[in-house]
Image (spheres, helix red, strand yellow):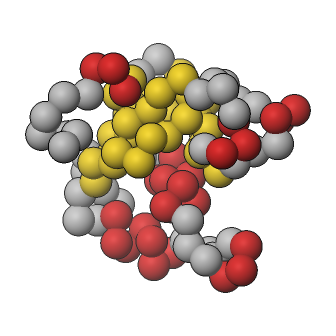
Amino acid sequence: MLSEGATLGVAGVDDVTRHGIIALDGDRIIDIVEKPPSEDVLSRLGTIGVYVFEVGIFDVIRRTVPGYKREYQLTDSVKVMVDEGEKVLYAIGDRLSPPFVH
């Protein structure tokens, strides 16, 4: 288990079928789905490829089941963290600044 969890960079998106989409409860991510069908949208907040993890994420990845085409999706590992009660937070894209975005 990670002691600090993770923080994901997110932004409002028009096409939810092209992003990992999150559901929130306050400052925490409580669900995440990779490229959901538009009729099953959790929100309009999608991941933007900015992730802050502790080294423990590698243990989570090892426990993540590969998805379509036996590929590992980072979104699936984040879902494992959320399901296990890890603290997974988010930062809205327009609030991100260096050193997070270069």
Q: In which quarter of the image is the N terminus?
A: bottom left
Residue at 39 percent across and 31 percent down: it is 90
Work out whether 61 lies above or below 33: below
Work out whether 82 lies above or below 64: above
Residue nearest the observer in this picture, 92 or 1? 92
Residue most extreme to the bottom? 70
Q: Tell me residue 18's x, y (percent).
A: 66, 45
Q: Quadrant of the C terminus?
A: top left
Residue nearest the observer in this picture, 30 or 85? 30
Residue most extreme to the left? 99
Work out whether 101 lies above or below 23: below
Residue at 28 percent across and 20 percent down: it is 95
Q: Tell me residue 16's x, y (percent).
A: 69, 36
User: In the rendered picture of this protein, how many numbered marks are placed on residues?
Assistant: 0
Residue at 76 percent across and 31 percent down: it is 41
Residue nearest the observer in this picture, 46 or 5? 46
Residue nearest the observer in this picture, 88 or 73? 73
Q: Can residue 87 be seen in this view?
A: no
Q: Is residue 19 left or right of residue 60?
A: right
Q: Can residue 52 be seen in this view?
A: yes
Q: In this view, does 68 lie to the left or right of 75?
A: right
Work out whether 96 lies above or below 34: above
Q: Quadrant of residue 37?
A: top right
Q: In which quarter of the image is residue 48?
A: top left
Residue at 73 percent across and 73 percent down: it is 68
Q: Tell me residue 40's x, y (percent).
A: 82, 35
Q: Tell me residue 65's x, y (percent).
A: 62, 75
